[in-house]
Amino acid sequence: MRIANSSREKNPQRWRDLRRDRITATEIGALYSGKSIPQLYADKHSDNSFDSPYMQWGRYREKKIIQRLMDEIKTVIDSNDDLFSYDDDPFFLSTPDGIGSDFVVEVKTIGRKLDRLEEIEAAGGRATKADFAADNILGYFGQVQTQIFTVPKPLCLFAWEYREKRPGVTIPNHPVENIDDLFTPGEWHFVRVDADDDAIRECKRLGVEYRKYVPSEPPKIPHSLWELQGEIESIERSIAVLQSDLELKKNTLNSIVMMSMEPGSVFEYPLGSVRYTVYTSRGKLDTEKLEEVLPGANAAIKECTRPGKPVTRITVKRRREGE
């Protein structure tokens, strides 16, 4: 069922709000690709948003690919940016890229070859879940299956274009009879929104244990954090370059001294002194040998050890392009 006033372009805030409170075809695809449900839940309820040049390119090419697909199959396809919900359970949403008479269209721009889907296309066949897995795009399979249910249409045309602009299209099979089959029993208690105890009732119906997942509230960290982290990384890169140059100069100095002097010697110059000293290596405590010689010594050392100062570690990692 099409949701009124849910256009991604015309009503972006409503589009995002609806997606945040339910589960989307894209997120089901992420589960197919291996993302954990707790991580998915945490991502949905964080303030983070992510866009990349690849995603922007995909949106730019989308309508052009659909137009070429229409020219090839001689069928009208309406471009779409509205949300659709599954009639039997509005919790499931999708935004297919195009809608035809008896099919939906999902468009992807891809930077590597899809060998198995190319074979299917050349043979005029329909791709299976195994074919998508063979090309390592199983997440796309979960995504298009959800679109089939939510629009609803019996088929999905999965159209792709390599970034060298070579087009391809294939039709995934429709191997599941019920949207429940997209999940294994027991996952519902993480995924469903627990409004009016819906999740509890659904778990009882499915015969699985209900365990509510409550993620910690993400802290409100200002955007300046990422700017500061960028400055830190820039300084660290500069330090690394200087450190490399420093090590090179130290090694050069040591080589000159070792070639000109004997260990233990020292020479005085008007500019200073040069001393060539060879230090003996420090020994390391062999705890196993110590225990053999003095049974219980290791325990005694631990007993006499004073606690050190507490260590605070803060790790900040910016998301890189393509992650």
Image (cartoon, grey):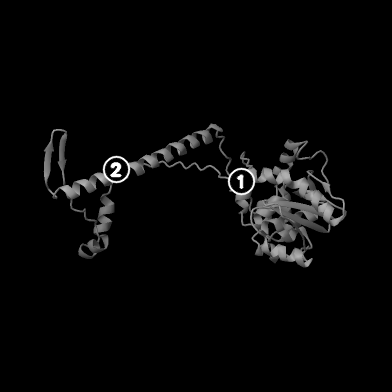
Q: Which amino acid does label 1 sit on?
A: Ala
Q: In this view, does 194 lie above or below 233?
A: below
Q: Where is residue 147 in the image (x, y as percent from the top left)?
A: 77, 53
Q: Name the residue under label 1.
A: 42
- Secondary structure state at the residue bearing disc 1: helix
Residue beneath the point at 21% across and 55% down:
283
Closest to the observer, 321 or 178: 321
Residue beneath the point at 79% across and 50% down:
66
Task: Give the Cα separation between the discs numbered 1 and 2.
Answer: 49 Å
Q: What residue type is labelled 2?
A: Lys
Kindly identify which numbered label has been placed on residue 249: 2
> Which label sits in the foreground, 1 or 2?
2
Residue beneath the point at 70% across and 59% down:
183
Kindly identify which numbered label has been placed on residue 124: none
Q: Where is residue 93 in the image (x, y as percent from the top left)?
A: 76, 48
The answer to whether mark 1 and mark 2 are in CB contact below 8 A is: no
Q: Where is residue 97 in the image (x, y as percent from the top left)?
A: 77, 48
Closest to the observer, 196 or 90: 90
Q: Is residue 1 above or below residue 116?
A: above
* Mark 2 Cα-neighbour bin, 10 Å: few <14, some 14–19, many ≥20: few
